[in-house]
Image (cartoon, coloured by chain):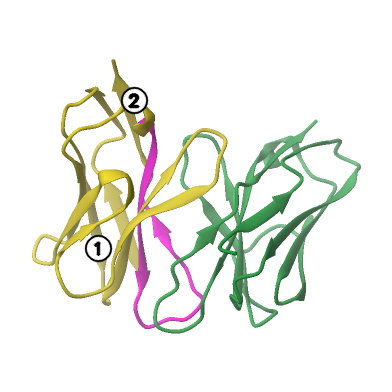
Chain colours: A green, B yellow
Amino acid sequence: DTEVTQTPKHLVMGMTNKKSLKCEQHMGHRAMYWYKQKAKKPPELMFVYSYEKLSINESVPSRFSPECPNSSLLNLHLHALQPEDSALYLCASSQEGVYNEQFFGPGTRLTVL
Amino acid sequence: AQSVTQLDSQVPVFEEAPVELRCNYSSSVSVYLFWYVQYPNQGLQLLLKYLSGSTLVKGINGFEAEFNKSQTSFHLRKPSVHISDTAEYFCAVIPRDTNAGKSTFGDGTTLTVKP
């Protein structure tokens, strides 16, 4: 299994809602990533988990809260988002060690009303 | 720190013509180099990567890229494009001396293949 899966594919939420994005991989990768991508722009790194511990937080607002329950799962909890948070949210995973080629999921298209 | 410059934001080309998408990078440390493709409303898919060895690397879908250390470039080429190659292409670098760490992406090149 060389796939990273993400659910849901699309999400529409109001600014007062609480929702979660989910990401799963079964490749035995010990590093997992959240990216935010606006239209026609490159992905922007948000968080990196390494061996289920948060290793990089790119100064992301606290309305985004990541969680790594186990080595295969990565969640992104959303609360009190702003319309400018509307974007494609991509999850990725990679091996630790020699090089870290990242495998990307298809993304969740988030719209904040 | 690293930076990646994709020299063309948009490249229009006719079907069956050759194409080159240009990527230059700057880094104070040795890096690995990658090209990703992103089709509309999808995630990123790895086209090819340069880790070491031969400077000409071949990837999926008939693409290839050449690493030029002296010019710090990693240009992507395809001898004959198809309509289905229309997509966004991203060049990226990762420092060799880190584990789970930060990729630096270029701003992307939109390849549009016309019939």
What segment is highlighted magenta in the picture? B86-107
Question: Image quadrant for the C terminus of chain A?
Answer: top right
- The N terminus of chain A, quarter of image: bottom right
- Please provide percent x and percent y for residue B102: 47, 68
Mark 1 residue type: Ser
B65 with respect to B88 (left or right): left
- Residue B26, numbered circle: 1
Residue B15 in the image: above or below residue B25: above
- Which residue is depicted at the point 28% across and 15% down? B115
Residue found at x 40% / y 77% = A99
Which residue matches tag 2?
B83
Element type at mark 1: strand
**Residue at point 19% right, 44% down?**
B77
Q: Is residue A68 above or below residue A20?
A: below
Q: Quadrant of residue B46?
A: bottom left
- Using the rendered image, report if marks 2 and 1 lie on a common chain: yes
Let me know if residue B89 is in the magenta part.
yes
Q: CA distance from mark 2 to mark 1?
A: 32 Å
Residue B20 occupies quadrant = top left
Badge 2 vs badge 1, beta-carbon distance below 8 Å: no
Q: Sequence order check: which comes first, mark 2 or mark 1? A: 1
**Chain letter of disc 1?**
B
Q: How many marks?
A: 2
For residue A30, side relative to residue B53 (left or right) = right
Residue type pointed to by label 2: Ile
x and y percent of residue A57 in the render? 63, 69
The crowding category of the residue bearing disc 2, from other C-alpha atoms within 10 Å (few below 14, some 14 to 19, many at least 20), is some
Would you say residue A20 sits in the magenta stretch?
no
Percent x, y of residue B43: 54, 46
Q: Nearer the viewer, mark 2 or mark 1?
A: 2
Q: Position of residue A2 (x, y in %)?
A: 56, 63
- Crowding around mark 1 (Cα neighbors within 10 Å: few <14, some 14 to 19, many 20+) is some
